[in-house]
Amino acid sequence: MSSLVAYEDSEESEDDSLSARHETLLATVQNVTCQANQRSITVCNDSNTTSDPWISAPDPAVFGPLGVITGRSMASSCLDFQQSSCVDVERKCSNVDEESAAACLPSPEGNNVHLQAHGWTPQGSNLVKRHTSASSSVVRPYIPKRQRLSATLELQEPQHEGGQTRESPVLLEASPRLKPYLDQKSSAATAELPRRLLMSLGGHHGPVNTIQWCPVPHLSHLLLSASMDKTFKVWDGAESGRCLRAYTCHSGAVRDACWTPCGRRFLTGSFDNTVVITDAETGQQVVKLDNQFKVMCVALHPSSPDVFLCGGYSSAVKAWDSRSCKTVKVYKAPIQQTLDILFLRGGVDFITSSDCVSMDSADRTLIAWDFQTTAKLSNQIYHERYTCPSLALHPQQDAFVAQTNGNYVAMFSSQQPYRMNKRRRFEGHKVEGYAVQCGFSLDGTVLASGSSGGSAHFYDYNNARSLHTLHAHSQPCLCVCQHPVLPATVATCDWSGEVKVWH
């Protein structure tokens, strides 16, 4: 019994001595660690030489590569004493900031950017640790994820010319200049002719082949222009005169372009053998079709805008369906190229113009086609040896006109057998081989035509009398487009790439 008590007393005394030795060792480790943290700063300033004899020859078994006592070396020395206490010692010794020690390594450039990022401030030849107070840490308010994402998107938006952070929208509300005229009907008695220049729109670097106002009344301030510089653009032709959007969907010259009836898309044909339908607002290509020949002209079906015709450097005219992106009909004729296409009223039949000028070209200059059956309805329409670069349909009467290289505009009936009116001819301008276009006013009382001399000519449709000649350009004037809403407002374009609006 006495031996058992003596054994228990010896265990208690041994435990007390072990705990005392553990506390002594722990205090020693903490003191050595603090001294090592303070003295290792001098080593960081110069890793090769040091003036402190205490760390002049660090023991690699105990000190790290920077002369700092590491937690692992100190913990390994505790294994001889008691394994259970080594975990606590290792945790205490891990207070050495390994990241700060790594940051103290001199950079190749010799700067202290890395040191300052980890809280070390250089003072002379030494480094001093910055102590941040608890009061400097401010609790940041919570920002919802949706708000953070919107702020990020605003910062990432590209800058555009003119100080704008984003592209201006194209399909705006009605222009203030248009609103007084939207509810009014055009009248022949109040019809006026343009006399002065309203604005000049410069931006194309090649001949502008065609221009067209938007057919939607409240968007009719938008002016579309197609150029040989491979672009087509939309302008604010009522007020500011600036280019709202430039579209680069083609790799070749844009020969023809027109608005869709909804006013939200364009149909363009190019010399790169493609026909493209483009969204006006986004500029994205909705449909792109390979036509396998250079496109000279395009025409939307008046009853079904998803179907359109295109002709060009080919003996055939193709009808496409933009929904299926397939050719639905082909109209073949013994010709070399098609210059223009015109749908007659209702879209049941249409007229094509070719470049035939041979002795027997009377049966190929103008051809009337049945849209459904692809059959020729008439080829004995125009019997003179002049090509017709453009066609235009009268907005109210059953008639259409053809611009001819004979320096006059011929008038025809839009009903079979499509006879030419030989007693009414609009003369006074020159064409001379240019693709000069002509067009009617909204009420059909005024016929306007460009000329190779750069002038815009206006004729009275009822008696073919010349009403006014506007000296618009110094280069050939290729197109004159009268505004569908604003009275006495027209747009003109020329061979040098200039577009002008007159009032």
Image (spheres, rainbow, N blue to C red):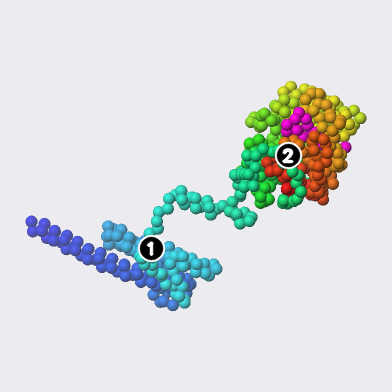
| Image position of 361 (left or right of 166) | right
Q: Position of residue 367 (x, y in %)?
A: 81, 28
Seen as rendered, the residue at the extreme left is 1
Name the residue that disc number 2 marks.
189
Label 2, label 1: how far apart the Cα atoms are: 80 Å
| Image position of 215 (left or right of 44) | right
**In the figure, residue 6 lies in which quadrant?**
bottom left
Q: Residue at x 78, y 47 (%)?
A: 494
Q: Secondary structure at mark 1?
A: loop
Q: Position of residue 85 (x, y in %)?
A: 27, 60
Q: Residues within 10 Å of mark 1 (few under 14, many from 20)?
A: few
Q: Nearer the viewer, mark 2 or mark 1?
A: 2
Q: Secondary structure at mark 2?
A: loop
Q: Residue at x 84, y 46 (%)?
A: 453
Name the residue that disc number 1 marks.
137
**In the figure, residue 57 lies in which quadrant?**
bottom left
**In the figure, residue 424 lies in which quadrant?**
top right
Magenta extent: 391-406
Q: Is residue 18 above or below residue 50?
A: above
Q: Is residue 86 above or below residue 366?
A: below
Q: Nearer the viewer, residue 173 or 320?
A: 173
The kind of residue on which mark 2 rests is: Ala
Q: Position of residue 395 (x, y in %)?
A: 73, 33
